[in-house]
Image (cartoon, coloured by chain):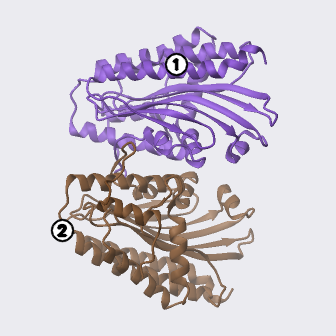
Chain colours: A purple, B brown
Amino acid sequence: MNKFDKHIKDKFYTYIQNLQNTITSKLEELDGKAKFQEDIWQRTEGGGGRTRVIENGDIFEKGGVNISGVHGVLPKSMQTYFGVEDADFYACGLSLVLHPKNPMVPTVHANWRYFEMYDKEGKLVDQWFGGGQDLTPYYLFDEDGIHFHTICKEACDKHHPTFYKKYKERCDEYFWNTHRDEARGIGGLFFDYCKTSDGMNMQDWYNYVTEVGNSFLESYMPTVLKRKDLEYTKEQRDWQEIRRGRYVEFNLVHDKGTLFGLKTNGRMESILMSLPPHVQWRYNHQPEKDSEEEKLLKVLKKPKDWV
Amino acid sequence: MNKFDKHIKDKFYTYIQNLQNTITSKLEELDGKAKFQEDIWQRTEGGGGRTRVIENGDIFEKGGVNISGVHGVLPKSMQTYFGVEDADFYACGLSLVLHPKNPMVPTVHANWRYFEMYDKEGKLVDQWFGGGQDLTPYYLFDEDGIHFHTICKEACDKHHPTFYKKYKERCDEYFWNTHRDEARGIGGLFFDYCKTSDGMNMQDWYNYVTEVGNSFLESYMPTVLKRKDLEYTKEQRDWQEIRRGRYVEFNLVHDKGTLFGLKTNGRMESILMSLPPHVQWRYNHQPEKDSEEEKLLKVLKKPKDWV
């Protein structure tokens, strides 16, 4: 490990602190009504976080932009997961989920994280970045999907010619509701275990992940502005709430991050801020033939190329 | 195995068919507005079921009373779960969940089931009953908890002096939302792997399980009648929807039956009929001090004895 690597965690934690500030202030400005409520929390075993949640805004019905930096002895369940014995760890990241009120505005999720593992003598033995972002529309405007994916691709292309294609595919694979045989949304990027390899050292990965993080607002805000004042019916709102049910199903049944948090005594309210504010489940609900709702489902059944 | 045992599965399947008829007709009569919608489904690998769902009733906002009888090769995930190799199986049962509209009326869940396992020559090698029922109030009327548990206890006491105490405790253990450190509801009965032992043969277990099943309507209907016309505020309805969120969390994160169905390609709409119709998640919601809502939480944090 070179000298820079020793400081990468501090540098990345400072980065996500600043990014959280930037994102929450821009979103407050955009919403115009609601403000983020901040909760600082400590983890008994080491570290803590800064949770910021917005509720009942003009645009954002519920959302969170959270950071955390935790460390200590690697919990048993993580040992099994990573296939290692006794070890110490450090993990930090920014997680965000935004659930807009208007069903014409898509839900968005993003997470950028960094992980370190140490042996019992405190020597750094492994380190990697991970993360991504994905979009979950309730009504599909092709240009919104194209815009989101174009920004993702531009950020990737500055660092590696194959990243967009690779991480777009991984995103489609990861956010798959197997029990429904459909995607959660229209994808974006998903990457994990980004370590020194393929001509990328940790500084290169740092540059890539922060490039992606910096592109987030540009990938999402223009779409919010375009859709936030569109009119919608009660039926369209119902459809949004039914689809939000699928979001809950994914997060509680399949999402590794959520389940990991639930099973390792993470800060529950920070983890479950991802769940939508109002949700419906109806028995065997099917959209009408050739409707806008059915059009969305067709894309969710078979992820498409957007750029 | 004696001759009777060979026919116990047919006898129990006939029993749950009749019980489904009895329960759905009584509930329709009680509701007065909505009727159960019936869906007959087949399982590709063998067997099928009869799903009956009620929605938008005067009393029942959503609910299902489903039976199924499935058989074939034991799926891989079940082999691991039961710790057996190649085997065939037969499983049948009745599952019901009722979500009333009025937050003063508790949600109820019940399930009574029977399982058989065979070796590759078709010889019956194992068989057991399982099941139980539990109550999930949003506002706690002590007399409703006492009534529900009294009926459970009376059914148990006719068969074994220790069953009520034992299965009441198991119910409290099973319906525990570990990540929230609280019970889903105020419990009832939970039993599983009821095999020939402790002086009970399979006929005795059949008698016990059907006694419990037969007592269901008496355990729940009087409470519905007492509470269904009570007035409630928007805030009380919100509280119900927030608590329903915990119901969803339990079913999707912890409930073995639901997860088993989701991971073995069960009939999704029949499994997920258990999810409530309208649900809310709010960030870090806490009831007011000394409120009725807080009184409920105190009991959920520490299950109490009702009889």
Q: Is residue A92 left or right of residue A86?
A: left
| Residue A54 on image: x %, y % | 35, 32
A166 up-or-down from A81: above or below: above
Residue drawn at the location 57% of the way across and 82% of the way down: B8
Q: Residue furthest top?
A: A158
Q: Secondary structure at mark 1?
A: helix
Res B229 label = 2
Q: Which residue is rendered at x = 73% and y = 70% of the image? A: B119
A254 and A204: which one is in front? A204
Name the spot of residue A212 as percent of width and height, x first. 54, 17
Q: Residues within 10 Å of mark 1 (few under 14, many from 20)?
A: many
Give me the residue at 45% from left, 84% from top: B153
Mark number displayed over residue B23: none
Q: Is residue A212 left or right of residue B235?
A: right
- Near-viewer residue (B287 or B130): B287
The three-letter code of the residue at mark 2 reads Asp
Query: Outermost residue toward the right?
Result: A121
Residue in front for this viewpoint, A93 or B149: A93
> Where does residue A180 sit, x and y in percent of width and height?
48, 44
- Circle 2 packing at 10 Å, graded few (<14), some (14-19), many (20+), is few
Q: Which residue is mark 1?
A: A213
Q: Is residue B16 above or below residue A58?
A: below
Q: Residue at x 41, y 59 (%)?
A: B274
Measuring from the top left, give residue B193's x and y in whole percent. Answer: 62, 74
Report the chain holding disc 2. Answer: B
Question: Residue A1's quadrant in the figure?
Answer: top right
Residue A307, visible in the rendered structure: no
Residue B144 shown left or right of residue B181 in the figure: left
Q: Amino acid at mark 1?
A: Gly
